Amino acid sequence: MFIGHFAPAMIAARHTDAPSLPVLFVGAQLVDWAFFGLLLTGIEKMRVTPGISVMNPMDLYHMPYTHSLLGSALFATLFGGLVFLVSKNRMAGIISGLVVLSHWFLDLLVHVPDLTLIGSPPKLGLGLWNHPAIEMPLELALTFGSLWLYAKIAKPKTLPLAVLAGGMLLFQAVNWFGPVEPEVTTGTSLLAFFAFGLITLAAWWVYRSEGRKQAG
């Protein structure tokens, strides 16, 4: 699951009390922002293991802080609390926290068993990465169905919306079909940060062009 994680952000952005779309995009991938940061420090670990799943050779064998349900809930609480402190809007904080927490449940669908509840076994994952004929259309439907629902309410301009859609599709294509690094390096995290950052920047552009702000 990559761009599918942005689906809850786009659904949540329809709510009148929701924070801005780019804030929700950060929240949607906050767990992975943290994971790739901890990967750089060696606190959490990943290795390339060809064949560990059909679609993804990355063996996420040690990520007790970011990809446990407890850890994700803590990230959600902190992020939601920060949004509440800045916005003074309780509902905005709740929405933001739920978007962060959605990350774990979407990962549960696709990961082979590597997620945990509290950072220790049992390890969980329904393994849709082993079923690309299901996972790929599901991720595309979640993402672009949510984008369409968001656009119906927010009425952003066509160009930034097209850039966001095209950027997500491009990065997802690279994720699915691009070359695989033989080992995990610093560049692995930097590439993830680049992709997350660029997509969030496109989301900011879309948010800036929303027609509902002018209409309201």
Image (tube, rainbow, N blue to C red):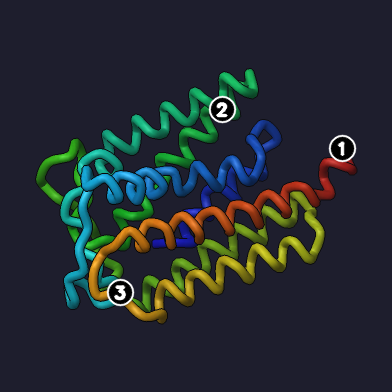
Residue at mark 2: 83
The answer to whether the residues at label 1 and label 2 have Cβ atoms under 8 Å apart is: no
Kind of element beneath mark 1: loop
Quadrant where the image shows the N terminus: bottom left
| Position above or below: 211 against 18 | below
Which sits earlier in the primary sequence, circle 2 or circle 3?
A: 2
Q: Residue furthest front?
A: 186
Q: Where is mark 3, residue-wise?
A: 181
Residue annotated with mark 1: 216
User: Which quadrant would residue 75 be assigned to in this image?
Assistant: top left
Residue at x-position 23% and y-position 69%: 183
Horizontal and vertical percent position of residue 51: 18, 77
Number of other residues with Cα within 10 Å of mark 3, as a class: few under 14, some 14 to 19, many 20 or more:
few
On the image, which quarter does residue 84 sit in? Answer: top right
Question: 71 above or below 62?
Answer: above
In the image, residue 50 above or below residue 98: below
Q: Residue at x 63, y 59 (%)?
A: 147
